[in-house]
Image (cartoon, grey):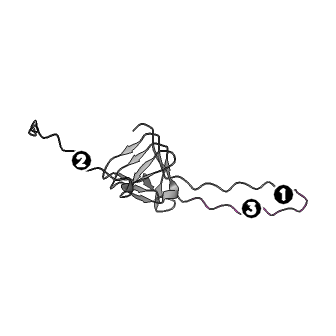
Amino acid sequence: MPPAPAPGNPKPKPPPSSSADWIETETGNKVSRRAQLHGTQHITLGGRCVISPLVTIRGDLVRSAPAAAAPPPSDASKPPTTARKPAAPPTSVSLGKYTILCDSVLLRPPSRHSREKGSLVHHPLLIGSHT
């Protein structure tokens, strides 16, 4: 058991963290500048998430998209179809609202060995809210 502080000496406070050590997003997420985020376009934060220093999130490990089939030959008699919106990049790591990641956490999407491809296939990692 640690010794009690002397009556005249208050408990020492941790050093204050400056706002330069953290990035705050519009949705209230706080991300430490010392955190390592790989593949940020594949990472989704739900809102009010806290990502502490020394956290590593591997968003670069994404399931590869299947090869798109060739479009059928166009027929001049048919009217052109409406253009589709470009697909959003696949999400490999998704965090819910009010999620706190403490120091030295490594988040990496789960993977499985594929017999057809002969390589690792990564699946999305979903973490719920209030965790």
Structural crowding at the residue carrying mark 3, measured as other residues with C-alpha within 10 Å and reported as few (<14), some (14–19) or many (≥20): few
In terms of depth relative to the viewer, which is nearer, 102 or 107? 102
Residues at discs 3 and 2 in contact (Cβ within 8 Å): no
Q: Which mark is residue 49?
A: none
Question: At numbered mark 3, what does the secondary structure look like: helix, strand or loop?
Answer: loop
Q: Amino acid at mark 2?
A: Pro
Name the secondary structure under disc 2. loop
What residue is shown at x 16% (from left), y 39% (from top)? 10
Report the span colored magenta. 65-80
SS state under label 1: loop
Residue 130 place in picture, x, y as percent: 42, 36
Dot 2 corresponds to which residue? 14
Q: Earlier in the sequence, mark 1 or mark 3?
A: 3
Using the image as rendered, state which of residue 58 and residue 64 is in the foreground: 58
Q: In the image, residue 129 lies at what x, y percent?
A: 45, 38
Image x and y of residue 36, in percent: 39, 59
Q: Is residue 74 magenta?
A: yes
Q: How many marks?
A: 3
Query: In the rendered image, which residue does mark 1 sit on?
Result: 80
Whether residue 62 is visible here, answered yes or no, is no
Mark 2 crowdedness (10 Å alpha carbons): few <14, some 14-19, many ≥20: few
Where the C terminus falls, by quadrant? top left
Q: Please tell me whether mark 2 or mark 1 is closer to you in this view.
A: 2
> What kind of residue is marked 1?
Pro
**Residue depth check, mark 1 versus mark 3: number of the one nearer the observer:** 1
**Quadrant in which residue 78 is drawn:** bottom right
* Residue at the limit of the structure toward the front, as seen here: 8
Determine which residue is flagged by label 3. 71
